[in-house]
Amino acid sequence: MPAKPQPSALIRRPAVVIALQALATFAILGTALPLLHSQEWYVRVFDYPRLQLFALAIVCLPLYIWLAPRHRKRDKFLLAALLITIIYQAVNIYPYTFLAPKEVKDADRKTHPNSWVSLLVSNVLMDNQEHEKLIALIQKQKPDIVLLLESDSVWQQALTPVTKHYPYRVEIPLENTYGMHLYSRLPLRQQKVSYLLDKDVPNVKTFVRLRNGVWVELHAVHPKPPVPTEDPTSERRDAEIVMIARDIANSKYPVIVAGDFNDVAWSRTTELFQEVSGLLDPRLGRGFYNTFNVNYFFLRWPLDHIFHSTHFKVESIKRLTDIGSDHFPIYIRLSFAPENKYEQEEPEADKQTQEEASELIEEGKEEAVEENAKQQ
């Protein structure tokens, strides 16, 4: 009677090894593709799942060592590539863990209350009808400033019970998922709505006066994502982000930028945004604060961002509860502490970085001209 196959022998079936090789190859290629100087959506989409690719590589490495033959050159190459993938992703993930130093220092709780400013950012999902959830959240958090994205006239009307307490506002109700509403308890001036590269995608620039009398430059951002249904490349998104960074770099005011960048915190474009603008990321050393996608816990990444100048420190930052959207809202409370700004290192752009920024802007403008020509 033939010997009964051992469980390990069953696991070593070629189909299982082939599937493992496919998953490992996906993790490796998904890590390598964003390194290419390409703005096609099918390349840029791999900027997003850094944590997922890291986890996949971590799982594949020991399983491959256990199950697959390792004497062939291709197996040795795959193992080496997996190890490099894990190290590369770990290096990029590390800054967003609590093990890393905080880019933005913790605020002194003894700071005068007039120096505090709080901001709630929420991509509401235009078709979401659970308006009462956001109303309850705003009433609970009581932020000084509320920024809504994907908001239309229905959302504008539905939120009246809570937004009536915010006398200063910029309302841009649109039906194309790029509507934007900015509500503030603090005075605003010079509210400017601009359409940088897309005639149907607004950006807001204004100035908000803190309770201590200081005026702060505030930008609200929501460029199109590089997906086939919106834009087949990231050229306009990247250019728009960098154009805003260039504008901020020339500012003589403290600055806060908030919105759905449709880009992750660790992408080269967002890094370029920080280097050109000189703004800080309060998540560094505190956590990822993944705001998208609410519906799939295993596919989440940080798309909604709040950056600020060195004039501020962080009292609290948190991802808030589900409001029926595909994005979680995010909340931050900042302390204006300009006397301590030099305790925080401001990102800087060297000559090569500025050239890269200029190149991105030109590519985005050319893409916008071509797109407008097609539509005429």
Image (cartoon, helix red, strand yellow):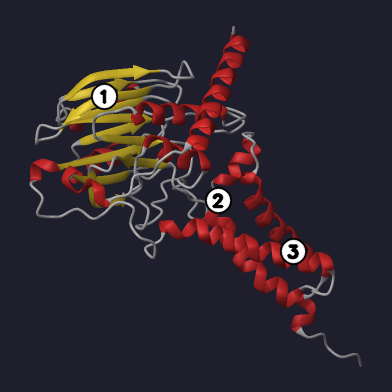
Cα gap from disc 2 to disc 3, whole angstroms: 20 Å
Dot 2: element: loop
In the rendered structure, which amino acid carries the disc numbered 1?
Thr
- Mark 3: which amino acid? Leu
Q: Position of residue 126 (x, y in %)?
A: 41, 30
Whether residues under marks 1 and 3 lie with C-beta atoms below 8 angstroms apart, the answer is: no
Mark 1 and mark 3: Cα distance apart in space: 52 Å
| Residue at the right extreme, as displayed | 1
Outermost residue, front side = 351
Give the amino acid at mark 2. Answer: Pro
| The residue positioned farthest toward the bottom in the image shown | 1
Disc sitting over residue 49 in the figure:
2
Mark 2, Cα crowd under 10 Å, few <14 / some 14-19 / many 20+, is some
> Which of the 4 image quadrants contains residue 72?
bottom right
Q: Secondary structure at mark 1?
A: strand
Tag nearer the camera, 2 or 1: 1
Q: Which mark is residue 78?
A: 3
Q: Position of residue 93 (x, y in %)?
A: 48, 57
The N terminus lies in which quarter of the figure? Answer: bottom right
Q: Earlier in the sequence, mark 2 or mark 1?
A: 2
Answer with mark 2 or mark 3, whichever residue precedes in sequence: 2
Q: Which residue is mark 1?
A: 206
Q: Residue at x 83, y 88 (%)?
A: 4
Tell me whether the residue at label 2 lies in contact with that at label 1, contact meaning CB atoms closer than 8 angstroms.
no
- Which of the 4 image quarters holds residue 187? top left
Residue at the image point whose x is 36% and y is 51% from the top: 283
209 relative to 123 in the view: left or right: left
Query: Crowding near pointer 3: few (<14 within 10 Å), some, many (20+)?
Result: some
